[in-house]
Amino acid sequence: METILDIQQRVKSWFASYESYAMPAVKFVVMLGVLLMMNWHLGYRLMLMRWILVILVSLVCALLPWSGMTAVAGLYLLGHVSALSWEGAVVLFALMFVAILLHYLFLPGASFLVVLVPMAFYLRIPYLVPLLAGLFGGGLAFIPVGIGTVLYYFMAGLERNAMTLLDVTKGIPDQFLTVLEILRDNRTMIVYVVAFCLVTLAVCALNRLSLDYMKYISVAAGGILILLIIMLGGSILTVPVAYAAAITGCVASILIALFISFWSGALDYTRPEFLKYEDDEYQYFVKAIPKMVVQKSERKVQEISSREPVPETEKGKNGLS
């Protein structure tokens, strides 16, 4: 345990020292992964698939805030979808506009969750995002998580109906109906949106309890709740559920979330402190739990001289004073 905590403190100290370089590098890698994901699954506009453009956009996004990166990713997505279907681009723009209104009215600052949800779906660990959103993002984080889930299933529906949308013999009304049916008749999307939103709220509520190890308990309970809601919703709405993939992805998401929660700050529950103070209107009872910290050992430098001191008798014989 001490070795792990020592590595944790060293990494955090290094990141704090070089944050001005490390954070842009992290943003560059994340944005590069997002753009490559879009090019792989929705690569309908060839100009946006050029490596030089992908790298340049990722470099620019490395200097932007997370909300700016979300806006650039949205424009990139619109570019691909407009090459596939202008009707799909119109519907996507309407969804993004509603998402922007809901997000900035209720939860500004967590817009990148909208982008992380589709990435997690493609990486087969979509359950990780609601767990972390409830743990670190607060209760209202269910808004961007739900929007991101809708966005993923809309992208998957466009990819699945690409041949129909590229058919030039169909008129605009038929194309609009095809695009709208992706959202209207997608019962799997409904199950996952409900599951992710409820789990985000449940993890946030459990994490606020003042019980020991509640951070880890809320993650485990959230993962189990996701599976239960997906299984129950699948049976009610007659949605086929790949139980093996769901269980594997959920277990992997729980383990990753537990590791991230431990890395963010392990607490020493053996040394709780209880504080009590009051003001003119309220009396406060506070339970404070210290974080685990490895004390750095102080190094003592001892100077060792290579020359031996000359004895006093020898000094007198040689005429030295």
Image (cartoon, rainbow, N blue to C red):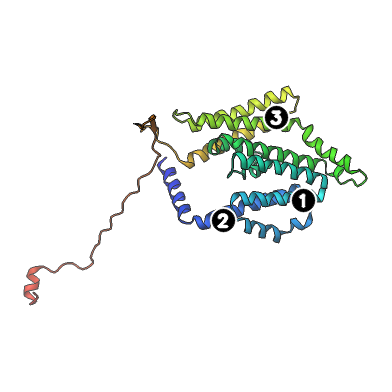
Determine whether, in the image, residue 117 is placed left or right of residue 81: left
Disc nearer the start of the sequence (1/3):
1
Q: CA distance from mark 1 to mark 2?
A: 26 Å
Q: CA distance from mark 1 to mark 3?
A: 27 Å
Q: Disc 1 marks which residue?
A: 80
Could you tell me the amino acid type at mark 3? Val
Q: Disc 3 marks which residue?
A: 191
Residue placed at 46% from the left, 53% from the top?
16
Q: Disc 2 marks which residue?
A: 24
Dot 2 falls on a residue whose secondary structure is helix
Could you tell me the amino acid type at mark 1? His
Determine whether, in the image, residue 212 is placed left or right of residue 76: left
The quarter in which the C terminus is drawn is bottom left
Position of 22 relative to 180 (above/below): below
Q: Are marks 1 and 3 in contact (CB under 8 Å)?
A: no
Coordinates of residue 203 in the picture (x, y in percent): 55, 31
Determine whether, in the image, residue 184 is placed left or right of residue 117: right
Task: Residue lying at the far bottom in this picture: please name it.
Answer: 319
